[in-house]
Image (spheres, grey):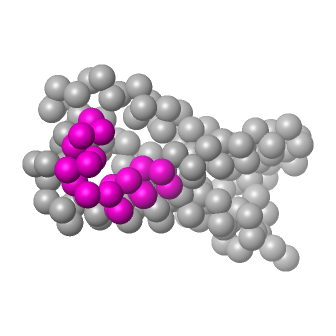
Amino acid sequence: MTLTSTDTPPASRNWNIALWVGQIALAALYLMAAWMKGMMPIADLAQMGMTWVTGAPIWLVRGIALMEFLGAVGVILPAATRILPFLTVWAAAGLLAIQALAIPFHLIRGEANVLGFNLIYVALAVFVLWGRTRKAPIAPRA
């Protein structure tokens, strides 16, 4: 089963542009988050407001960073090269799964003030997932 549809009519140029903007924004946000969680000291992250990192094992924080990095690369690279472009859809789904875990985690910890950021990530991931599945799928290289 694939997440891309092959029976959709060609998308307009505007849809492709909008989806690329969404993909780039999603990748940029996740690359920034991955860099912060993967490279910055835990104390610095906590000072910036990511207080949950002080109670989490270091391997979890760095593991989340790795998954965010892979998702950010996956949302751009397969579509840009048109090599296995369905992986872009799967990457968007994976980034959405990260948020499906992050939102209840923050709610349980009483950190509802950060949910606005989570919802931006969700909206972008859903847009890319929907757009590259239904509205403007990218055909693989011939």
> Is residue 107 visible to us here?
yes
Confirm whether the magenta stretch covers residue 36. Answer: yes
Residue drawn at x 22%, y 43% is 46
- Is 68 situated left or right of 28 in this image? left
Q: Is residue 136 above or below residue 106?
A: below
Expressed as whole percent of the image width and height from the top left, the position of residue 40 reads 32, 57
Residue drawn at x 56%, y 38% is 124
Q: Is residue 118 above or below residue 42?
A: above
- Is 62 situated left or right of 10 in this image? left
Residue drawn at x 85%, y 76% is 142
Confirm whether the magenta stretch covers residue 94. Answer: no
Quadrant of the rendering where the N terminus is positioned: bottom right
> Is residue 129 visible to us here?
no
- Is 41 situated left or right of 31 in this image? left
- Is 51 situated left or right of 63 in this image? left
Residue drawn at x 19%, y 40% is 51
In this picture, which residue range is highlighted in magenta? 31-49
Q: Is residue 64 above or below residue 9?
A: below
Q: Is residue 79 above or below residue 22?
A: below
**Secondary structure mostly taken by the magenta-highlighted segment of the chain:** helix
Relative depth, front residue between 6 and 53:
53
**Residue 49 appears in which quarter of the rendering?**
top left
